[in-house]
């Protein structure tokens, strides 16, 4: 078992504004070379947590450690510039009156020749070495973002805090710049804490995701685990569209259009929601009035009538009304599949991909 302390540890952080708790007992570890993502909707406390770590805001209680050394509690406080923490934001925050080279060199100390070597090295790594003497307004958005990255890592910070740094870029540039940024940060061994409200970005970039809601971390783990074992219905819905099948428990079972579902440990008469993502709903045509034979993982087939179908790029989205109770359910199908409204079809669902939650 490793005794190495986390590069960053935030412990029981609480922050109130105007009587409202914005950050609620947040504890989080980030190891060297690890990318951890604070993921959640706007207003959930992500950016406030980042500002507290950076030292530009003060927590009401809790402590922050860097490499096992306390940098902040409610009495002791290391100034922001001495925490070895780099910052990257959406607006890049480049100095318009300074050249690219001077922007990158801004936070460096030491002999002029040594600073110039570091600046040149970093601009080569972000493929901007020919822009040493160019000013920010002469660069594209993607180039400005790479200058901001070079400036942020120039002092070799132990920790990089990133607040939605790629949201201002168009989709064509975003993926490439994200990947390049991560590669450089991992090479430097920097611990990265990234804030985003985009699940796809978190899944793509993070080694570890901390899902926030209402100031709390409601679930944390590797992207695969957070996506496939959501803590609750809201967590499942945050990552993708969902279908919700309603039921009531009797004898640890819930009757639905797709047969009975196990609800172990749930008291009788408890109302539950069975959650399944559209990509796990299987469609088969009605064959002579008979539904398709189910497999053990699919359970019982249910008859439904098409209400609407749309092609949305790589797949088609088909919306149905179930005969069983008139409720609606959606399915996604690879490629083009556009049945007409009123078409009866049989549906089955992947039981191993369903989540059962007591209704709130």
Image (spheres, rainbow, N blue to C red):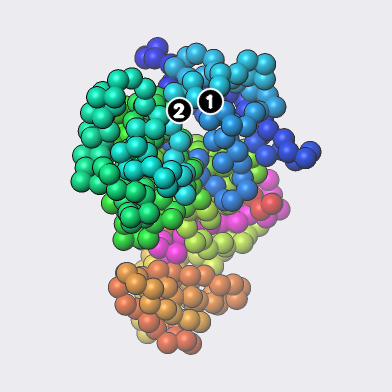
**138 or 159: nearer the viewer:** 138
Q: Residue at 66% of width from left, 53% of height from top?
A: 359
Q: Is residue 359 left or right of residue 311?
A: right
Q: Is residue 4 above or below residue 39?
A: above
Q: Residue at 25% of width from left, 39% of height from top?
A: 123
**285 or 75: nearer the viewer:** 75
**32 inside magenta stretch:** no
**134 or 35: nearer the viewer:** 134
Residue 203 spot, x, y in % from top left: 39, 47
Residue 32 spot, x, y in % from top left: 37, 25
Q: Is residue 326 above or below residue 69?
A: below
Q: Quadrant of the N terminus?
A: top left
Residue at numbered disc 2? 85
Q: Splitting the image into 4 quarters, where does residue 16 fall?
A: top right
Tag 1 secondary structure: helix
Tag 2 secondary structure: strand
For residue 14, which numbered disc appears in the image? Answer: none
Residue 108 spot, x, y in % from top left: 36, 26
Residue at numbered disc 1? 80
**224 or 348: nearer the viewer:** 224
Whether pointer 2 and pointer 1 mark residues with C-beta atoms closer than 8 Å, the reply is: yes
**276 inside magenta stretch:** yes
Q: Splitting the image into 4 quarters, where does residue 86 fall?
A: top left
Which residues are the magenta region?
262-281
Q: Residue at 21% of width from left, 42% of height from top?
A: 129
Furthest residue to the right? 19
Spatial CA span between label 2 and label 1:
8 Å
Residue 45 visible? The answer is yes
């Amino acid at each position: 078992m490793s005794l190495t302390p986390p590069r960053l540890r935030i412990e029981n952080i609480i922050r109130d504004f105007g009587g409202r708790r914005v950050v609620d007992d947040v504890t989080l570890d980030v190891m060297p070379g690890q990318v951890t993502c604070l993921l959640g909707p706007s207003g959930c406390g992500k950016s406030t947590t980042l500002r507290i770590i950076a030292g530009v805001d003060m927590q009401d209680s809790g402590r922050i450690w860097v490499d096992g050394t306390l940098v902040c509690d409610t009495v002791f406080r290391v100034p922001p510039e001495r925490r070895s923490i780099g910052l990257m934001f959406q607006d890049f925050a480049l100095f318009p009156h300074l050249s690219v080279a001077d922007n990158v060199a801004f936070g460096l100390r030491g002999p002029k020749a040594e600073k110039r070597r570091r600046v040149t090295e970093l601009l080569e790594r972000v493929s901007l070495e020919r822009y040493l003497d160019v000013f920010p307004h002469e660069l594209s958005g993607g180039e400005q973002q790479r200058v901001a990255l070079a400036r942020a890592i120039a002092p070799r910070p132990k920790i990089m805090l990133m607040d939605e740094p790629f949201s201002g870029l168009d989709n064509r540039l975003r993926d490439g710049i994200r990947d390049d940024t991560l590669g450089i940060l991992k090479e430097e061994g920097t611990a990265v804490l990234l804030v985003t409200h985009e699940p796809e970005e978190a899944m793509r970039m993070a080694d570890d995701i901390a899902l926030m809601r209402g100031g709390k971390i409601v679930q944390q783990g590797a992207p695969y685990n957070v996506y496939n074992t959501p803590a609750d219905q809201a967590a499942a819905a945050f990552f993708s569209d969902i279908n919700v099948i309603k039921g009531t428990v009797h004898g640890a079972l819930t009757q639905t259009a797709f047969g009975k579902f196990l609800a172990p440990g749930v008291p009788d008469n408890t109302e539950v929601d069975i959650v399944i993502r559209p990509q796990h709903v299987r469609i088969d045509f009605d064959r002579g009035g008979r539904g398709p034979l189910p497999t053990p993982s699919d359970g019982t087939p249910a008859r439904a009538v098409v209400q609407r179908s749309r092609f949305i790029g790589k797949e088609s989205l088909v919306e149905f009304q179930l005969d069983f109770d008139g409720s609606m359910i959606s399915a996604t199908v690879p490629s083009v599949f556009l049945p007409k409204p009123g078409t009866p079809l049989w549906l089955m669902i992947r039981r191993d991909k369903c989540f059962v939650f007591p209704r709130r």
